[in-house]
Image (tube, rainbow, N blue to C red):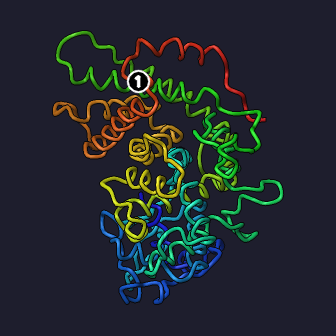
Amino acid sequence: MNPIDNLIFTSQARSIFNVGATTHTIMPPVNLYWPIHLNLDGSTKPTLPGSSGYDDITRYSFVCGDDTDFIEKSMQKHWFDIGHHLIYTVDATNLPVVLQTAGSTVFSNFKIPPYHLIYAYLMENSRIAQIFEKLIQDYVHDEKYSKANGEEEFRWLVNTENLFFKQQPHGSYRNTAGTLRPLTEGTRRNAYQRLFGLELGFGDFRNSNAEYPYTRAQVSNQSFIILFESLLGEFWQAYINARNAVGPNTTDVVHITETSQRLQEMLLARRTYRTDFNNYRFYNLSREEFSAVIMMSWLHYAIASDGPVVTWLGCGANTAGERLINIGNKVGLPAHSKSVAIIDIAAPSAAMLRSVEIGDFNNEAWVNNIIHANDPNWSSTTKATDKQIQSELLTIINNWETITGHPIKNQNKIPARVAEVKARPEPAMN
């Protein structure tokens, strides 16, 4: 699910909706209509997206639009939609409206939060945020790069600074900085440390890469990485056993579900006392998660292709990671050397951990369907989805080994670390 597409979709959605003859009592915070001056191709509004989302003309007309406030309001309403689990269909005029009765849905369906903080952590660990911060800082203070004469790249620079490198309005749901939390990067680092027990792989570029000054929480999920790798390792064993016709079968679906349940409990303990996402907007780290994911998605889209910003900088390449490495070299801040692999697993890892948090991996039948997705003799009514999830898990496993050097595919090296986790309980929320 592309967050940029969701923001565009949200900007078209009807803000006032009815249940029968009665106006709904929960009213979104803003009315949004696609302004004609945001469209570089001259159309009055984008058409509804196809199965692969909006086309790049529509996306660029949004992110490079000449109205930063409109984009910010789209983000505000998107948060509202997520928090209230809104589901959309279309009306007679082909505009999105909230679906209140049974029927077909289109594109955006927010029964559960569609994003996960692990996406933001992985993207930021590529150093994408600091690289673009340095780029914009250099551009507004100097002329070391060629002038952004084209409208698209200039507007993108303005929008990116306004949206992500200035303090947000007090009423903004993305406002996670102020007197108590001076820098948004420090807020994100605190969230990563609390939910995953992980640090970013670099320091403060403003201070010769010294250790970044942020408040470290006393309660954090220090065992996350061990359980996460154990779950991946157990799935890998199940996957290769499903493909073996002879030899011992070391598949342990019960261990997979037990590991997943422990990981689920660990992650939810940092968020809430509850076991569901019905009140997500009131949970710990929800606004921080939304703010971080939207920011990293915005920057990710800038390097997703050889678009206006990449072309202006002369940093074209075959992959998003290679483009980021080129831009990092240009601004003098080296990106993570494994940026290609890191960016490749950001979205799949988010989908996986959200599935863990809602309990999908606790279901033995669901896990077996994923394990046997390519078995023609295995009966499942969700074969296409099963194959996609299996492919994403394999992508995570292969790239995780590349990034970390940890032996995900060699279970003989993992049990001692797992035993260590089982021996000590995770801290509860205080």
Q: Which image quarter holds the N terminus?
A: bottom left
Q: Which image quarter holds the C terminus?
A: top right
Residue 72: percent from left, percent from top: 60, 73
| Residue 279 visible within the image | no
Question: Could you say which is closer to the camera, residue 78 or residue 41?
Answer: 41
Question: Could you say which is closer to the camera, residue 273 or residue 247?
Answer: 247
Query: Which residue corresponds to the image point at 44% horizontal and 63% vertical from the top-left?
Result: 302
Query: Which residue corresponds to the image point at 40% horizontal and 50% vertical from the top-left?
Result: 321
User: Does residue 412 lie above or below 57 as drawn?
Assistant: above
Q: Quadrant of residue 140?
A: bottom right
Horizontal side of residue 81 vs 300, given as left or right = right
Residue 275: percent from left, percent from top: 61, 40
Question: Could you say which is closer to the camera, residue 232 or residue 401?
Answer: 401
| Residue 353 visible within the image | yes
| Residue indicated by mark 1 | 408
Horizontal side of residue 263 vs 88, given as left or right = right
Type of amino acid at the residue the image marks with label 1:
Ile
